[in-house]
Image (spheres, coloured by chain):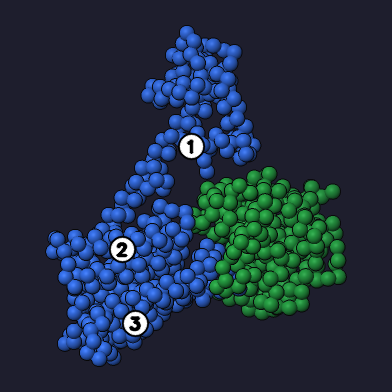
């Protein structure tokens, strides 16, 4: 792990909805090559943090740098998997077509996806174990399969940094294992992966880096150093005991 | 057919297509209500434009109307963002306000000019051929044919150029934003096109019924296909078919053209809603009935499997009381099992065949592990395991 190389640097980031701060003065440096979980209670601003890094939400203060430059200049380095529930799965389109959408960023405006993009999409489908489902209408997929499709769509972007918003929500155990294996492979390949995560039990098993968030940043660092009762209690506000700790 | 009749039908066809294309995206974005709002609130824009130009199909009037249409969307979103009221309430606040301004302006100033409130609201296609486009004494056809023709041409060009961007921002605005394919620009672009089309569709169906031409064909197409391109084609086709048949129905019954068109659209939607192959009401009901029967079949097979060694539990007569089913249901389940060679009956004692045993194993396995691979071939035979 090259901890000296900072992939994402966030300074004094404050985000507000209707003047009510959702994220307050966040400073965060995410090293290159980590597989990081963002944990925190509901309404802690986990998704908002990802969305403001990705320029989907405009912060009222602070800055975000991806490898030292603003996100707008570094889009090609970043892939994003939104929450599964954020889209309408009854939309008239196929699994392959959704995966192809991952190539739209590198294509830019107006240019259409061609054979090369289709090939990349099929490869990504194969990686997530969904080859054979490409012509399936997306509403005909199970929750786990839909999540795999979303993951494939991010893989096709061939990015250096991956943001995922609750990729394990509503998926079966097999899919969860498959997804985490792919994420671990990405880390092995030197990519940085940031995941909004809910299941505290699996944090030590899945991740090597963790950020505790509850409107303010509580702590960030290696799981083995900072994933403890003290930080959990600070984040969740109740006396937390993680029995799963070593 | 007279020349005027051909011209009227030509206008109707172009209007139907021009409405169906943006309408498809509005339906997919769950924005049908905002179309309704736009179609009403462009009225003040039209009135002001008319006062200035005295011409219902002048480009300035179309521009002003489009501007009011976009203003509606901006206002609705502004009110919504205050967090005080929800979107539907915001729409309900904005468009009556703008619409009533238009109505007052007409009543106050246009009593002596020929801007008739009925014509604006309901349209009168039959009069469209009278307003000619004449250049150097050369008759180039009805003005509204040119207007809607140009609007349609622009719409199709934009649609082909930005199809990929429109699709992504409609399906997943978050990703579109992250990829730099600005969903906000596309959103307002679509709203502008919808506003302009509404004005252009004016002569044909008026400001109010235009919503039918935008929404009904798209909603009908949505029930029939899982492919966005096909949905666009189907919506346009339905629009054209209904516009033409509506015209001829109006002709034969001597009724309002726009009323007949809209009614035809409604009837077509109803038919498709009832009879569509996958999403239609009858097909859904049939599928639910099948599913109930199959769950019963599975319950029955599992019961047989559980009592392999206890013949009394498997006696035909005992089944009714034991599984607590109505006679009719028991009979149909028994018949289904026999048809599929899953059971055999010897001396009124039912037992599973090899196939039945295998099926029960497979099914219970599937339910417990939720693994898909093994079930794929069963899916073809049974509804039960389909999503």
* Residue annotated with mark 2: B240
- Rendered residue at 61%/61% (across/down): A115
Chain A display color = green
Same subunit, labels 2 and 3: the answer reads: yes
Q: Position of residue B241 (x, y in %)?
A: 29, 60
Lateral position of residue B188 relative to residue B365, left or right: left
Secondary structure category for the residue under label 2: helix
Chain B display color = blue
Asked whether the residues under the numbered discs 1 and 3 touch, taking CB atoms below 8 Å apart as contact, a structural biologist would say no
Secondary structure category for the residue under label 1: loop
Compare marks 1 and 3 and give the one earlier in the sequence: 3
Compare marks 2 and 3 and give the one earlier in the sequence: 3
Q: Position of residue A8 (x, y in %)?
A: 75, 71
Q: Nearer the viewer, residue A125 or B172?
A: A125
Q: Position of residue B379 (x, y in %)?
A: 53, 37
* Residue annotated with mark 3: B62
Callout in the foreground (2, 3): 2
Mark 3: few, some, or many residues within 10 Å (few <14, many ≥20)? many
Lateral position of residue B210 relative to residue B67, left or right: left
Same subunit, labels 1 and 2: the answer reads: yes
- Rendered residue at 74%/66% (across/down): A160
- The residue marked by circle 3 belongs to what chain? B
Callout in the foreground (1, 2): 2
- The residue marked by circle 2 belongs to what chain? B
Spatial CA distance of label 1 from label 2 is: 36 Å
- Rendered residue at 57%/12% (across/down): B310
Instruction: For the N terminus of chain B, give its image quadrant.
Output: bottom left
Give residue B125's quadrant in the image.
bottom left
Lateral position of residue B55 relative to residue B367, left or right: left
- The residue marked by circle 1 belongs to what chain? B
Q: Nearer the viewer, residue A93 or B274?
A: A93
């Amino acid at each position: 792990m090259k901890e000296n190389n900072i992939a994402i640097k966030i300074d004094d980031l404050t985000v507000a909805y209707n003047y009510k701060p959702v994220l307050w003065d966040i400073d965060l440096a995410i090293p290159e090559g980590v597989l990081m979980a963002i944990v925190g209670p509901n309404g802690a601003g986990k998704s908002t943090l990802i969305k403001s890094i990705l320029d989907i939400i405009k912060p009222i203060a602070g800055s975000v740098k991806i490898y030292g430059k603003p996100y707008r200049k570094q889009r090609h380095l970043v892939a994003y998997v939104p929450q599964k529930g954020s889209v309408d799965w009854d939309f008239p389109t196929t699994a392959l077509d959704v995966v192809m959408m991952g190539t739209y960023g590198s294509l830019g405006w107006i240019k259409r996806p061609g054979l090369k993009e289709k090939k990349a999409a099929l490869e990504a489908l194969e990686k997530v174990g969904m080859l054979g489902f490409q012509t399936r209408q997306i509403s005909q997929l199970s929750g786990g399969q839909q999540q795999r499709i979303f993951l494939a769509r991010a893989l096709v972007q061939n990015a250096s940094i991956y943001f995922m918003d609750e990729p394990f929500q509503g998926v079966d155990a097999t899919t969860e294992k498959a997804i985490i294996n792919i994420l671990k492979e990405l880390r092995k390949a030197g990519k940085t992966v940031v995941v909004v995560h809910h299941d505290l039990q699996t944090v030590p098993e899945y991740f090597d880096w963790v950020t505790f968030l509850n409107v303010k940043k509580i702590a960030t660092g290696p799981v083995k150093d900072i994933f403890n009762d003290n930080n959990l209690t600070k984040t969740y506000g109740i006396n937390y005991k993680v029995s799963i700790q070593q | 057919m007279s020349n005027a009749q051909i011209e009227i039908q030509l206008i109707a066809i172009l209007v139907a297509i021009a409405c169906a294309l943006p309408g498809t995206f509005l339906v997919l974005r769950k924005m049908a209500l905002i179309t309704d709002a736009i179609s009403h609130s462009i009225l003040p824009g039209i009135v002001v434009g008319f006062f200035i130009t005295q011409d219902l199909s002048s480009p300035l009037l179309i521009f002003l109307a489009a501007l009011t249409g976009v203003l509606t969307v901006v206002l609705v979103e502004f009110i919504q963002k205050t967090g005080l009221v929800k979107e539907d309430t915001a729409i309900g606040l904005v468009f009556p306000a703008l619409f009533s301004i238009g109505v007052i302006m007409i009543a106050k100033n246009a009593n002596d000019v020929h801007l008739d409130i009925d014509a604006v609201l309901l349209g009168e296609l039959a009069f469209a051929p009278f307003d000619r486009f004449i250049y150097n004494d050369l008759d180039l056809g009805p003005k509204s044919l040119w207007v809607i023709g140009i609007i349609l041409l622009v719409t199709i060009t934009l649609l082909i150029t930005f199809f990929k961007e429109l699709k992504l921002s409609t399906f997943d605005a978050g990703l579109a934003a992250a990829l730099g394919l600005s969903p906000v620009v596309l959103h307002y672009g679509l709203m502008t096109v919808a506003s302009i089309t509404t004005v252009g569709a004016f002569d044909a169906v008026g400001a109010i019924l235009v919503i039918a031409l935008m929404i009904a064909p798209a909603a009908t197409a949505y029930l029939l296909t899982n492919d966005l391109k096909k949905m666009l084609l189907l919506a346009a086709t339905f629009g054209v078919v209904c516009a033409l048949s509506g015209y001829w129905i109006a002709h034969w019954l001597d009724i309002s053209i726009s009323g007949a068109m809209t009614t035809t659209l409604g009837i077509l939607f109803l038919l498709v809603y009832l009879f569509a192959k996958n999403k239609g009401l009858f097909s859904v009901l049939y599928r639910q009935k099948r599913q109930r029967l199959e769950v019963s079949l599975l319950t029955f097979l599992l019961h047989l499997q559980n009592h392999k060694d206890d013949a009394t539990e498997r006696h035909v007569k005992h089944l009714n009381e034991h599984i607590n089913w109505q006679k009719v249901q028991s009979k149909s389940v028994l018949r289904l099992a026999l048809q599929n060679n899953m059971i055999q009956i010897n001396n009124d004692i039912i037992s599973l065949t090899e196939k039945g045993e295998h099926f029960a194993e497979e099914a219970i396995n599937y339910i417990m592990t939720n693994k898909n691979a093994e079930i794929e071939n069963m899916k073809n035979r049974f509804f039960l395991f389909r999503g």
